[in-house]
Image (cartoon, grey):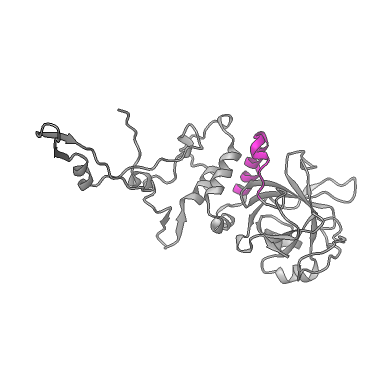
Amino acid sequence: MSMSYCPSPSSLRTRPTREFYSLPYPHIQPSNHLKLSRRRQLDAGQRLYTPNSINGGPVRRSTLTVCSAHVSPWDDKPYRVLPGGEISYYDELDVVSFLDPPKQLIPLDPSSYNPAAYLWKKIDDIPEERRHRLLALLNPGLITRAWEVAGTRYDNSNLSKKSSSSLFAGEAGAKLLEFWHCRTNGGPLAVAWINYFKTALFCCIDGQTFGRVIDASVFGGLSRSFAPLYFTVREVNEVMSTEEPCDVAYEFGSGLLDLQGYPQGFPKPEKHPWPFNDAVVIYVRNVGPGVMAGQAWQEGEDMNQVPKKLCSEILMVKDYSHLDTSW
């Protein structure tokens, strides 16, 4: 008889985080455990007696009845309530803990698994309607770490084919519109709104993908009226300044795009103000379903200008309240 051990929910809750770093295979999830009440334990050992139709004598027949209940290792509660009443979800904390592991945990050897694949799976575990909470949970340092981890995605041929957006995966039909919330840090004072902004990505009827900044925190009205900030989405393989791999690039150019059409209510393209008219490009990596990370570079119109980062790494999370809206 083989026996297996599964920790009880109470023992798991005593740990600050689920110690997935100690698992030899990070894709293995904690198994469900079996609960037997005292009544069920008694039933499991109950012996039933039935008459034998052949010799008429009583024959003892023992039947083992096991009644099981499917119970989550987290006691059907995928969250814990903090003292202030705020709800903290374990699947979201898994992403934070993976990017910033507790000091007492020894990380797995990166050569034994693909960190980007594990991060992709953990983001996929978070329901779509809660993924926007990562914008508040991940500080600038963790956003940078997410960009770095996503860089190992290109070592896995299957994972490198996955995309965070249907617009990038070639699954989009004509005239598709997506909205994304973005967060970064350290933007120039002249464009301080870039620390919290929103973008719209849309596919035109000719198959070309474009986008624009549509909101920018408290300065959203100014950004909409002063500069539509349209950009062209192109498939590229690397960041020009660092030669690091990436998936797509948002090229702002001059802003004077010859669009065949754009979503209703969007303003017509206009010339970009500084610094977006100085060859600004946002390079994007797919991190997980509905989650991307980017680097914004001011590459400069002057050939002698040294490219510089416009801000720190950018976290982008899809707005699932506007699912694949058609315009």
**Magenta residue span:** 142-164
Q: Quadrant of residue 196?
A: bottom right
Q: Is residue 172 above or below residue 102?
A: below
* Quarter of the image that includes the C terminus: bottom right
* Quarter of the image that includes the N terminus: top left
Q: Quadrant of residue 35?
A: top left
Q: Is residue 56 magenta?
A: no
Q: Where residue 109 sits: x, y (%)?
A: 54, 30
Say whether residue 161 is left or right of residue 85: right
Q: Outermost residue, top direction? A: 1
Comparing 239 with 263, the one in front is: 263
Q: Where residue 106 sits: x, y (%)?
A: 49, 34
Comparing 280 with 319, the one in front is: 319
Q: Please tell me which residue is depicted at 75% across the width and 52% down the height of the picture.
A: 310
Say whether residue 12 is left or right of residue 62: right
Q: Is residue 198 above or below residue 285?
A: below
Comparing 194 with 249, the one in front is: 249
Q: Is residue 161 magenta?
A: yes
Q: Where residue 82 sits: x, y (%)?
A: 41, 58
Q: Main secondary structure of the magenta part?
A: helix
Q: Is residue 311 above or below residue 189?
A: above
Say whether residue 255 is left or right of residue 87: right
Q: Please tell me which residue is depicted at 21% across the width and 37% down the height of the picture.
A: 63
- For the image shown, how many numbered marks are present on the structure? 0
Q: Quadrant of residue 247?
A: top right
Q: Outermost residue, right direction? A: 303
Q: Is residue 280 above or below residue 67?
A: below
Q: Where residue 322 sits: x, y (%)?
A: 64, 63
Q: Outermost residue, front direction? A: 54
